[in-house]
Structures are given as C-alpha cells and as structure tokens.
Image: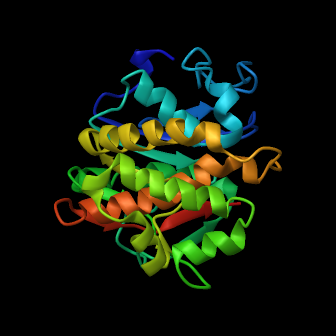
C-alpha cells in the first residue's frame, strides 16, 4: 500500500471482501479489499498487504479488522481516521435520530457518501460511534445465546483482558450489566485514540489466538471480529468521561 494514497488529515477505510461491480468511493474514503490467500483483488488500487504479518491468513478471524490492522502496522493512521464497511457508512448530518439504522439502495451509496463526509470537520476532536440495543439482555447473555460455541472462549478472553489491562477496570461486570454495542467495529476518531485502541485490541487478540477453539464453522471462525466489537464497546465506555463521544446513525446499503 502506498503512503501517498492515504490522506494524512482525513481518511475513512472502507473494507471490502470481494471484487466489485459498482463505483469505488472518492477521497477521503479509502476503499481497501481484504486479500485472499495473498492474491491481489482485481479493481482495487489498495488492498491488505500480505507481508504485514501474513494478514490474509488472519482474515478468516479478523474480517474487516484486517484492514485496520494493516494500516496501523504500517503507521498509516491519519489525523482523523475512521473504519467502515462497503455496506455501512455513518450518517454525519443532524437530520436523523442517532440510534437509527437508515436503509438505502446501493445505487444511492456514492451520493450519500459524498454528502455525509462534508459534515466531518465539525467532529474533528470527537469519537464517532454507532449504537445498537441488544434484545435478550446483556452483552454477556447475548453472546452466550448467539455464539454458544464461542462463549467459554469469550469468558476466558474477558478474564485475560482484565489481567492485561487492569487500569481499565472490570470488563466482565460491564458485559453483564450493559445491553448495547457500539457495533460493526465502526468509528471515526483522532489518531491518538485509534492508535491506542489498535495497540490494546491487536496485542490482546494475538495473546489469546492460540487458545481459540478448533474446528469452528466459517461463521464462528470470525471470533476476533465478534470479540473486538464487544471489547470496543467496553473501551468506549472507559474513555467517554474524558473524550467527546458522539453517537451517529448508520446507513445500511443493500
């Protein structure tokens, strides 16, 4: 990946998983495709560089996290940096309830992306996240119901996280007493916050990788993405007293 392709002031990395048949987004969006077995995807100028810790090997667990991992490892996090997904973008204007999910057709994606990024500058020092309430109780119970094969591993991971980062408090208590997610591993934040989060989550994921269950199906193999979404919610709660955290709705394209 060429550093000249990355805007040093503003960039929002948009993660793709396959080759595309629709227009890529303009700057400051960075359209990046996860590599598959080290093979460069057609149609993309930017893609995960496989020599960064063989990231394509991790894609089955990291999913869209692999884009963030690759940029962080190469020290290409811009002053204001965001992560997104080709089907999900933040709605940055003030016309919608912050807890909404706004459904739009893919044909409208280009127009909405260009319009919404115009509102980015007023949040220059803020951390922008999405929000979703969880049906069926707490983060802890919801994961137990949604991913029973992963729950013992998640329980172990939460204890390990508390040991690695004791200054952050009690993640298990948080997971048992909160019923929302700052979801989809999506955010826009100042570089200092992004680098801090990357250091926390990637060092943690690598520390527990060897303990992951074997013979998981392809869905549960994405455990790193599922876990990070929950630990990101915990991280946001730990910084919200000293950081301006702004909840914005997400536009879902289909």
Q: Position of residue 252 (x, y in %)?
A: 61, 63
Q: Residue at x 67, y 26 (%)?
A: 56
Q: Count numbered badges in the picture.
A: 0
**Can residue 200 be seen?**
yes
Above/below status of 25 relative to 72: below
Residue 196: percent from left, percent from top: 30, 41
- Indicate the position of residue 207 as horizontal and vertical percent values: 50, 37
Image side of residue 26 versus residue 117, left or right: right
Q: Quadrant of residue 72?
A: top left
Q: Residue farthest to the bottom? A: 136
For residue 25, say whether it is visible: no
Please name whichever residue, 95 or 193, is drawn nearer the observer in this view of the structure: 193
Q: Position of residue 62 (x, y in %)?
A: 61, 41
Q: In which quadrant of the rendered image does the C terminus lie?
A: bottom right
**Furthest residue in direction left, as rendered:** 242
Display colour scheme: rainbow
User: Viewed as shown, does residue 229 lie left or right of 24?
Assistant: left
Q: Residue at x 43, y 76 (%)?
A: 96
Q: Nearer the viewer, residue 149 or 198?
A: 149
Which quadrant of the figure has residue 34? top right
Horizontal side of 3 relative to 84 (left or right) equals left
Q: Is residue 165 above or below residue 90?
A: above
Q: Residue at x 32, y 32 (%)?
A: 78
Say which of 100 and 107 sits in front: 100
Q: Residue at x 34, y 60 (%)?
A: 236
Viewer-proximal residue, 91 or 209?
A: 209
Above or below, 22 against 136 in this view is above
Whether 75 is drawn above or below 119: the answer is above
């Amino acid at each position: 990946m060429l550093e000249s392709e990355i805007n040093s002031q503003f960039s929002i990395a948009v993660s793709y998983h396959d080759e595309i048949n629709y227009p890529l987004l303009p700057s400051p969006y960075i359209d990046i495709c996860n590599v598959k077995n080290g093979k460069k995807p057609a149609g993309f100028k930017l893609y995960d560089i496989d020599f960064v810790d063989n990231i394509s090997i991790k894609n089955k667990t990291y999913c869209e996290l692999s884009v963030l991992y690759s940029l962080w490892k190469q020290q290409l996090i811009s002053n204001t940096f965001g992560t997104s997904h080709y089907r999900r973008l933040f709605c940055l204007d003030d016309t919608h309830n912050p807890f909404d999910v706004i459904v739009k057709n893919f044909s409208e994606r280009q127009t909405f992306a260009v319009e919404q990024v115009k509102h980015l500058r007023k949040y220059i020092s803020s951390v922008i996240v999405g929000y979703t309430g969880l049906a069926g109780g707490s983060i802890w119970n919801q994961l137990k119901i949604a991913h029973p094969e992963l729950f013992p591993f998640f329980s172990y991971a939460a204890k390990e996280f508390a040991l690695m980062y004791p200054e952050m408090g009690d993640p298990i208590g948080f997971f048992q007493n909160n019923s929302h997610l700052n979801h989809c591993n999506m955010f826009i934040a100042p570089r200092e916050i992004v680098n801090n989060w990357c250091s926390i989550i990637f060092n943690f994921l690598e520390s527990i990788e060897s303990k992951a269950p074997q013979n998981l199906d392809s869905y549960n193999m994405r455990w790193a993405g599922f876990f990070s979404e929950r630990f990101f919610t915990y991280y946001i709660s730990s910084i919200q007293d000293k950081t301006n955290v702004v909840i914005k709705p997400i536009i879902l394209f289909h």
